[in-house]
Image (cartoon, rainbow, N blue to C red):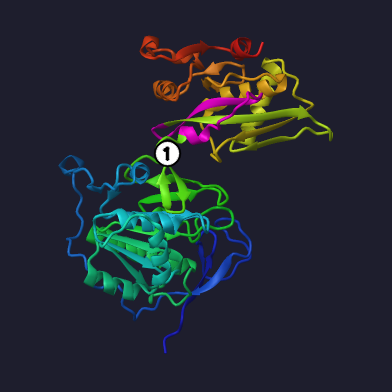
Amino acid sequence: MAKVKTAYFCQSCGHQSPKWLGRCPSCGEWNTLVEEVLEKEDKKGPLAQWKSVSLASKPKAIVEIKYEEEPRIVTIDAELNRVLGGGIVLGSLVLIGGEPGIGKSTLMLQIALTLTQRVLYVSGEESEQQIKMRAERLTSKNHNCFILTETSTDNIFRQIEEFNPDVLIIDSIQTMQSSLIESGAGSVSQVRQCASELMKYAKESGVPVFMIGHITKDGSLAGPKTLEHMVDTVLQFEGDRHTTYRILRTTKNRFGSTSELGIYEMLGTGLRQVTNPSEILISQREEQLSGITIGSMLEGNRPLMIEIQSLVSVANYGTPQRSSTGFDNKRLQMLLAVLEKRGGFRLGTQDVFLNVAGGLRVEDPAIDLAVVTSIASSFEDGFVPPSVCFAGEVGLGGEVRAVSRIEGRIAEAEKLGFKKIFISKYNTKGVIFKNYDIKIIPVAKLDEVFGELLR
């Protein structure tokens, strides 16, 4: 009997060690190394039928290489097309991650039911009856969508060879198990091996493969980091389970931009595409309140108008609180220092709370002007007219700096009915004011904004 070989794998980063260590030398995490059985030499893989017949690779001059645009499957889901860079690329391997219960399986089943191609939906977590129950709630019906409940990759590839699908969906990669690895499903070696087999199948057959992946407590995709390097596209499905809106974000894409964003609304009949997200990110108010402004942010090629809410109150417990939701707390500290030093606002004894409405996480510096105006409005207890919006970065000298793609931001504000937009004076080059019905107000310093609105 052959001796079984084992190794220790880090459950956080996938680092392999020949012996157990208390701390992973790669990621520095403690007590994450788990012993797993390595693959045996006398077994044949489930991909034996997918033998590559290509010749050995030879060096070729780059000018001799013929390039053709990657063919894509354009779905009726415009949000998915956007985050994938224009549609599903043939032979691509896409990984979709998200928290439990956020709607990953619902999203992929809804996509499977709307495609005209033959789709094989492989589920290792739910039975056929459970998937049927979810499909009944969705409005789409498709006779080209087939369900397979299986966890063994041997049996899955045997069915694939007979069925010959156009699109393959795996739900989820953590439940798959290969006969080449002796460890249990969900282990680092199993996840890596199953993903490798699916990648080989996708590249040799040209069939796009979607893999649903779980995430860990810290929000990263479960399994080794090498899994993210193997796939072509990584999508994160985000949102609060207590709200109806979901965000599909691209973190890696070999066939398109990595800064695109898709927004959905979870309904009883499935996920509805939100074509105009600015309307849901701006709350409707009957009365005017202090500390509320509208800023222009950019996600990929899409300009969004978002609502910034601030509350400034006297600190009653010594050290003032600085709390932000959806905005970087360190940048908030910097903007408060600019307001105190350059704007003359005494915020050293004030609690400051900042919130980005709609549950978005904003990293675009173009909303700095909206943030500082919102804080100043709450401090002065004066309201900013709801027909005014802002697009500008704030520097340490109190100057309003230029931002990218200002024409798209102005056009979005005009489309939503805003009357005025404050932009940087250094952003006016190339902007033809008479082409817009909205009033464009260029400013160079924060004092100009506060003098126009608050003082």
Task: Measuring from the top left, give residue 86's x and y in whole percent.
Answer: 30, 42
User: Residue at position x 55%, y 47% from top?
Assistant: 243
Label 1 residue SS: loop
In the image, 71: left or right of 136? left
Quarter holding residue 104? bottom left
- 391 w.r.t. 122: above or below: above
Query: Would you say 344 lies left or right of 328 here?
Result: right
Q: Mark 1 points at which residue?
A: 259
Q: Judge whether residue 69 can be spotted in this image.
A: yes
Q: Where is residue 66 in the image (x, y as percent from the top left)?
A: 16, 44
Q: Is residue 50 visible?
A: no
Tell me which corner region of the image, top left, top right, bottom left or bottom right, holds residue 394. top right
First to last magenta residue range: 278-302
Q: 29 above or below 448?
A: below
In this view, the residue farthest toward the bottom is 1
Residue 7 in the magenta stretch? The answer is no
Q: What residue type is labelled 1?
A: Ser
The answer to if 296 sits in the magenta stretch is yes
Relative image position of residue 357 (x, y in whole percent) = 57, 36
Instruction: Give the residue at x 30% y 74%.
Output: 46
- In the rendered picture of this protein, how many numbered marks are placed on residues? 1
Q: In this view, does 241 lie to the left or right of 264?
A: right
Q: How crowded is mark 1: few (under 14 residues within 10 Å), some or many (20 or more)?
A: some
Task: Decide: is 182 above or below 445.
Answer: below
Residue at 24 percent of width and 55 percent of height? 116
226 horizontally vs 292: left or right = left
Viewport quadrant of the N terminus: bottom left
Q: Which of 261 and 232 is in front in this view?
A: 261
Residue 298, percent from left and from top? 45, 31
Residue drawn at the location 56% of the way across and 41% of the way down: 359
- Nearest to the observer: residue 277 or residue 18: 277
